[in-house]
Structure formats: C-alpha cells, structure tokens
Amino acid sequence: MLISSNLLLPPWLQALLAEKFFDACLTHKGARKNEKNIFCLDCCISICPHCLSPHNSHRLLQIRRYVYNDVLRLDDAQKLFDCAFVQSYTTNSAKVIFLNHRPQTRIVNIRGNNCSTCDRGLQYPYLFCSISCKVDHILTTKGVGGLSSFFCDCKFLPLSEPGSDDGLMTPDSVLEPTGSTKTSSSSGGYGGVDCKTLACTATTEIVRKKRSSLTSSCRTIFPRITEISSNLMNRRKKAPCRAPLY
C-alpha cells in the first residue's frame, strides 16, 4: 500500500486499504466458505458470510479477488469515492478496479502511459492503477483538502447477493482493460490460474495431436517407401536392347 499519511484518511478507508482479506474466519473455523471477503464500513472490520447477522443494517462491501489481488466492483466503489481515471477491468460481465497497487512484473515503459503513483503501465487515458494509488496521489499533490471532493456520502450499502458469491474469479472469467478486445493475453483465473496459461495449454494439446497424427501417418508411409527403394536397388541390370543392324 502506498498511502503516505494514513492518519489523514477516514477510519473505514484506512482499515479497508490495510485489511488482509480471504483469511479464514477464526469464529467459524469449521464452517464451509468461511473466508473473510466482506468489509463492514461501520465497524471497520472484515467478516465472513457467517458473520452477517449482527451487521445486516450496516454498510457492507463485497471484496473479490483476482490472482491474489483484491478488487471491488466499480458500481460498489463509485458509491463510496470518485473512481475517475482509475483503470477498470471487465470480469464476469462486470467492471472491477483494484483496491491496492500491484507489484511490478516487467520493466517500466517510460514512453507509455503509466500510473501517476507507482509507474505501472496503463491504457490511455487512465492515470491510476488502483484506489490506493489515486488516494496517495491526492494526498501528495493536494493534501487533506483534496480528499473532500473524493468521497461520496453513502449511508446505505447492502450486499447485492448475500452469501451467493465467494468473491473468487472462476477459471473461465476474462479480466481485460475496458474498451479493449479480448485476446489470448487477457487474463482471468481462480487462485492464480491465468487465461494465457490455459490458452497455451490448449495450443500445446492441439500441436501434440497434430504431431501424433503426422507421426502415425509417416510410420505407415515410410516402410512402403523403404520397401520400394530396396526393390529398385536389388533389381539386376539387364542386357541393353539395341536395334538390329541392316
């Protein structure tokens, strides 16, 4: 997390950016689906679906995860703060944004469009890769006064479908930048499974099938060619036929 001055943020946002989600709930150790993937803005804590009863009247935020990174649905996030210029992605037919910045996996492209805070590569015209990067940028450039126009007055935030979503992306989901076309490099996964990896695996299987079919066909053709070549080599040379002399 890149927040430079946590004490300047509202308590619920401090807890949201610092919380570690999807750990097992200690209160419901033996229960099924006991991952803490719900955040209560009024209590500033993360809870699991089995802890919802005391928080039914509170503002609740569903946290989802993609490849070990926490994401929020854009519709839910916009009810709490201004998400303009934060790069959104499409997964499971819904737009999501990352909660915290992600570690760099490649060399920063200086000429490209990068995040204003962590220099991560982005698509134009986005300026931030996550909510935390935008908050940190506002605190650095505008100070505490700049945050007043960033937050929204949200007094009611229920879960869209309580208990029906575990927050994890399915293997067939697609996570891609908004407005771009789907390619094999677009990623979506469950527990770190990457669509690119799945596409490569499928391609490898196709190549293996083609190679096996070619190998089997060559095996049937080559013995026949070898037999014909052997017969031609073993054939005795006959006496030449010449035209009679008159």
Image: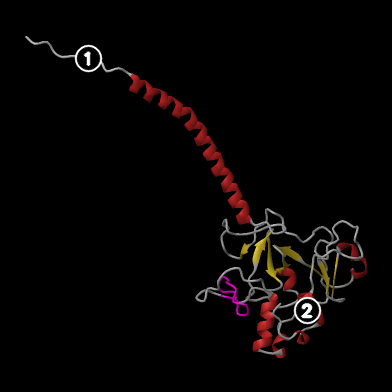
Q: Is residue 125 magenta?
A: yes
Number of numbered labels in the structure image:
2
Q: Residue at x 86, y 61 (%)?
A: 34
Q: Quadrant of the C terminus?
A: top left
Left or right: 2 with respect to 56?
A: left
Q: Is residue 117 above or below residue 213?
A: below
For label 1, the residue is 239
Query: Of helix, strand and loop, which one carries label 1?
Result: loop
Magenta segment: 114-126
Q: Is residue 28 magenta?
A: no
Given this view, does label 2 or label 1 mark the residue nearer the observer? 1
For label 2, the residue is 13
Q: Quadrant of residue 159?
A: bottom right
Amino acid type, residue under disc 1 in the picture: Ala
For the residue pair 230 and 85, the one nearer the viewer reads as: 230
Q: Residue at x 60, y 52 (%)?
A: 199
Mark sitting earlier along the chain (2/1): 2
Magenta: main secondary structure: loop
Q: Is residue 91 above or below residue 239?
A: below
Q: Residue at x 57, y 56 (%)?
A: 184
Where is residue 48? Give x, y as percent: 86, 64
Amino acid type, residue under disc 2 in the picture: Leu
**Outermost residue toward the left?**
246
Left or right: 40 with respect to 88?
A: right
Left or right: 82 with respect to 220?
A: right
Left or right: 245 with respect to 116?
A: left
Where is residue 134? Give x, y as percent: 67, 79
State the CA–CA distance, disc 2 to disc 1: 102 Å
Q: Is residue 137 above or below residue 197?
A: below
